[in-house]
Amino acid sequence: MLLSLIRAFIIYTLVVVVMRIMGKRQVAQLQPFELVIALMIADLATIPMEDTSKPLLSGLIPIAALLLAGLILSYITLKSERIRAFVCGSPSIIIENGRINLDELKKQRINLNDLLEQLRSKDISNISDVEFAILETGGQLNVIPKSQKRPLTPKDLNIQTPYEGIPYTLIMDGHIHHKNLTKAGKDIKWLSKQLAEKNLQPRDVLIASLDSNGSLEIQIRERGNK
């Protein structure tokens, strides 16, 4: 029993490391070869966990080999556009100027119900409002509405807007993020002063973030969650 737990922990840790090395992508954004590698790794990982009579290396070595193959293929597709098109495919235009491309729809094996569902998920109810609908290589559908159907932006109204940077999270779950504090150009004395003005300690704060305007937003923990 203990041996099975140890083997499961080792394999789980290895698979997590492998997936981290492969990069940050959602499942829907995986290229076909990446999805195949992920599925094969999942299958290989179960073999040494289920059968303790088999050496642990019998599962670890194939997983490492698949990781290496994935990294090599990723590097090749990064450098060669021709190989990238062959391995990953090319985007497909499903709708152009409000008209559905039936040939491409059949080629990609997408029915009209699925297409309409994806359009509705992007707040598009009328196909004639679509300039382009592009099926990306990862399988997601990107929709570009016609110019007269797009929401107004400040640029359309010639309104100048101030720059908005990414807020810095200074405290999360009661712990101070010193690196973010330094990046924001602040120090611990400044943060302590801001908290003292509200009679707070870091442990009292669920999350505190500093925006580009210098405004510190603080959300206090619930008493029962401390």
Image: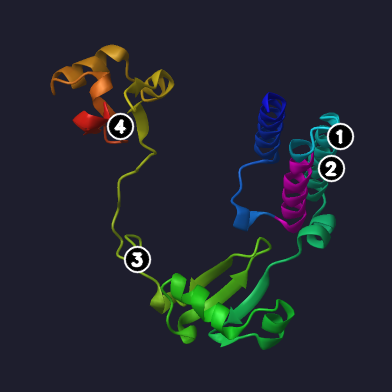
Look at discs 3 and 2 and give the one toward the viewer.
2
Q: Secondary structure at mark 2?
A: helix
The answer to which of 49 and 140 lies nearer the viewer is 49
Give the residue drawn at x 19%, y 16%: 193
Whichever of callouts 3 and 2 sits on the residue coming sooner in the sequence is 2
Tag 3–tag 2 contact (CB < 8 Å):
no
Q: How is the image coloured?
A: rainbow
Residue assigned mark 2: 69
**Element class at badge 1:** helix
Secondary structure type for disc 4: strand
Return the residue nearer the eye: 167 or 138: 138
| Residue located at (57% from left, 74% from top) | 133
Q: Amino acid at mark 1?
A: Ser
* Disc nearer the start of the sequence (4/1): 1
Residue carrying label 1: 58
The residue under label 4 is: 207
Q: CA distance from mark 1 to mark 2?
A: 17 Å
Vertical comparison of 56 with 94: above or below: above
Tag 1: Cα neighbours inside 10 Å, few (<14), some, or many (≥20)? Answer: few
Say which label, 4 or 3, has the lower sequence index: 3
Q: Which residue is mark 3?
A: 156
Q: Of residues 34 and 197, which is closer to you in this image? A: 34
Residue 82 at x, y percent in the picture: 84, 58
* Mark toward the viewer: 3 or 1: 1
Q: Judging from the image, what secondary structure is the residue with disc 3 in?
A: loop
The magenta segment: 31-47
Q: Which image quarter is the C terminus in? A: top left
Q: Earlier in the sequence, mark 3 or mark 1?
A: 1
